[in-house]
Image (cartoon, coloured by chain):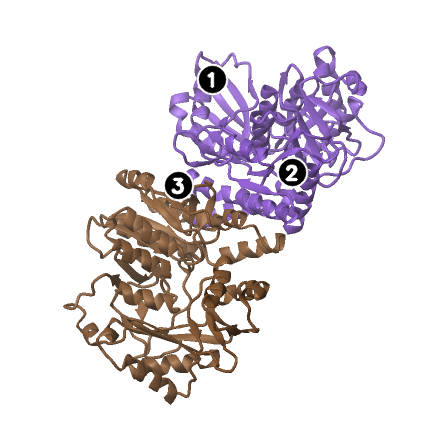
Chain colours: A purple, B brown
Amino acid sequence: MNESGRGRRIVAKFGGSSVADAASIKRVARRIVAAKQAGNEVVVVISAMGDTTDELMDLALQVSPQPQPRELDMLLTTGERQSAALLAMAMNDLGVEALSYTGSQAGVITTAQHGNARIIDITPGRIEKSLEEGYVVIVAGFQGVSQTTKDITTLGRGASDTTAVALAAALRADVCEIYTDVDGVYTADPRIVKGARQIPRISYDEMLELAACGAKILHLRCVEYARREGVTVHVRSSFSNKPGTLVTGLVDMQKGNAMEEAIISGIAHDRGEAKVTVAGVPDQVGVAAKIFEVIAECDVNIDMIVQNVSEVATGATDITFTVPMSDGKKAVDALNAAKDRVGFAELRYDDQIGKVSVVGVGMRTHPGVTAKFFGALAAANVNIQMISTSEIRISVVVDAADVDAAVQAAHSAFELDADEEAVVYAGTGR
Amino acid sequence: MNESGRGRRIVAKFGGSSVADAASIKRVARRIVAAKQAGNEVVVVISAMGDTTDELMDLALQVSPQPQPRELDMLLTTGERQSAALLAMAMNDLGVEALSYTGSQAGVITTAQHGNARIIDITPGRIEKSLEEGYVVIVAGFQGVSQTTKDITTLGRGASDTTAVALAAALRADVCEIYTDVDGVYTADPRIVKGARQIPRISYDEMLELAACGAKILHLRCVEYARREGVTVHVRSSFSNKPGTLVTGLVDMQKGNAMEEAIISGIAHDRGEAKVTVAGVPDQVGVAAKIFEVIAECDVNIDMIVQNVSEVATGATDITFTVPMSDGKKAVDALNAAKDRVGFAELRYDDQIGKVSVVGVGMRTHPGVTAKFFGALAAANVNIQMISTSEIRISVVVDAADVDAAVQAAHSAFELDADEEAVVYAGTGR
């Protein structure tokens, strides 16, 4: 971030892989020191070191098969506090005064929903004061404090990005830089598509659809927050000085001429969902509502929904939907418990599926995108199980084994392939 | 603590060795559940698991050779938060609702001196409310929040005991139980003296002298706090149901008849000090004051002080004092830097020393204790380097290699030896 010019206010977020050990922490410290010494005001949001969160989760499961969510939040939030304190120490050694704050101290006020709290408000008084006094501020990501119970909360996995964007909005920062182990947003996962290209600029809407469809680079809630608050997000690699990807409201057509031509900005995929089929449902008003009431009661998010045309003979129909694989058991258990109330014949569950999505604002004005996508899938011999569309996205559910072929076929069909191979990237921190 | 009767309010502290792993945490949870189910109100103060604090300190030193005290406190306090959360999870699984609180949430208000803060006040509103609602409250020990800066502080090593006593005072608890890996206070370290006996009751004054003289079982500040606030402290083993040792204001002579006869309650020793000799000091008014000003400025506690009679020929004298070994370098560096201001000839440093102390309220009314102690040392061929006394204590500094022999000789001379061997104990957690 050191080349970003003078006197800007920057919120920068570093993921767990950027602070995996003492050497990485020192490297990140040097990067932040350079930005500070270039005259910027800097607030850093930090994730837990490497596998810390997984290790703490293992420890919790050794003590309790189903750890209490309130206590789990108390436990897990220590990971970010540790990395924040360590980073502040490393910076102080480099001669730049830094202060670490917990989410609570930083004024991250949330709902009381442990494990998946939402940010209600940011009260950045302490941060503002510390910035005025010349400090770099390091904030433990992923956490806040409940407005009602005053208990420590977590925002759910991936939510350090959201903390960063929310802080950037509250502090009226010029930019929110998200440092990760990838050097930006790609047209597809370069591990699957050799010709995947890095995208220099992308709109909030497209980024939102990509995030919702499984692109792991930015957390969905983070992009939503950025769009709502108009925060410019800059996705960059913590391992290089490459320009990265800017996520903004209006993609500047002057600078991004190539973008104007592109109908499709990228192909996303997601292997993290499972498919639940409720079969033999009476085709009556209110039955679908009952099913989704049951699912809502157990706090599971539904992604795609398909209802078959009812069979004339039986007057019954099937309803199929997808949920996060981690919530699959919860959804199935809840439905089985409510079998009499809902009135269905059979429940089927399949987690050997994948979702492939084509995203692009260009498709609003380009008919034929659906035809081209489905044609490419057919040519690659990929069977479509479910379909869902938005104004700027088409998603299909396919067999898990077909995901790679589907992504490659779509990437080529929409002429996204680059001439040279992309750098392969690993999973990102949270 | 389950046999303690019904309806009492108990503050119980468990050290790091009592919660070293998941199995230990579950065992402690069962013990607390039994106390709660017996009708008591229970507040638990917990240390970090096993070696967590040392591991975090290692991590800090990997990142920074001299970690900033504020950030070190932020880092180290996560250890107790983890064990508190894990213990609460384990208790909830046993059907007893528990809530973990950080020191800050528990209302532990301290000075701003990072690494060695002192408790100024306890505002136990949240704890009181949780107890009224029927919860067991688990408090992360060793930590608080600064009254002035609102930063997270630590109370220094051993200070979870102090947290427990301070909470017991603020909550007007009936007793503060300190669970450790020893089953009480002994007349000497059973690792050195095979015939050491467990003491059923001991006064604050004697416990204070024992703690100050190196008995590691209770932290000095904790006993001071207990005496000032009149908190009954019960030292017990977390591995057995033995009766332990009660530390109280007035030792009940009815129950403790044996105590009435005892002149000496115990022999303590301390290998943690170093001896600094400032040689060739002009024997003038104000010179000693200058030396100890220098030491006070670098925040080092002095224990014993001896000044030699000045030599007639030179008009110069030597001043020798002891400091904690960990502060030895700091003290020597500070004195060397102030050599011109103080005006001395030479500085000598020796950390191969040990302090052996004889403690007992009985010595107030029994002359000849000093003669008996020194006679025993002479018979054991132990040379005395320094001497210091209080109303209920005599301490000597001896060569480190002579400590064991000195302790054994004194223990036998004051007829403290038991008929059978004591259980050998290990170091206690903090």
For residue A428, which numbered disc appears in the image? 2
For residue A185, which numbered disc appears in the image? none
For residue B105, which numbered disc appears in the image? 3
Of labels 1 and 2, the one closer to you: 2
Q: Is residue A45 above or below residue B272?
A: above
Q: Amino acid at mark 1?
A: Ala
Residue situated in front as seen by the camera: A359 or A376: A359
Which image quarter holds the N terminus of chain B? Answer: bottom left
Q: Amino acid at mark 2?
A: Thr
Report the residue marked by disc 1: A288
Q: Is residue A12 above or below residue A228?
A: below
Res. B190 in view: no
Looking at the image, residue B195 sits to the left or right of residue A178; the answer is left
- Within 10 Å of disc 2 (Cα), the crowding (few <14, some 14-19, many 20+) is some
Mark 3 falls within which chain?
B
- Within 10 Å of disc 1 (Cα), the crowding (few <14, some 14-19, many 20+) is some
- Disc 1 to disc 2, C-alpha distance: 37 Å
Instruction: Determine contact: label 2, label 3, CB under 8 Å.
Output: no
Circle 3: element type: loop
- Disc 2 to disc 3, C-alpha distance: 33 Å
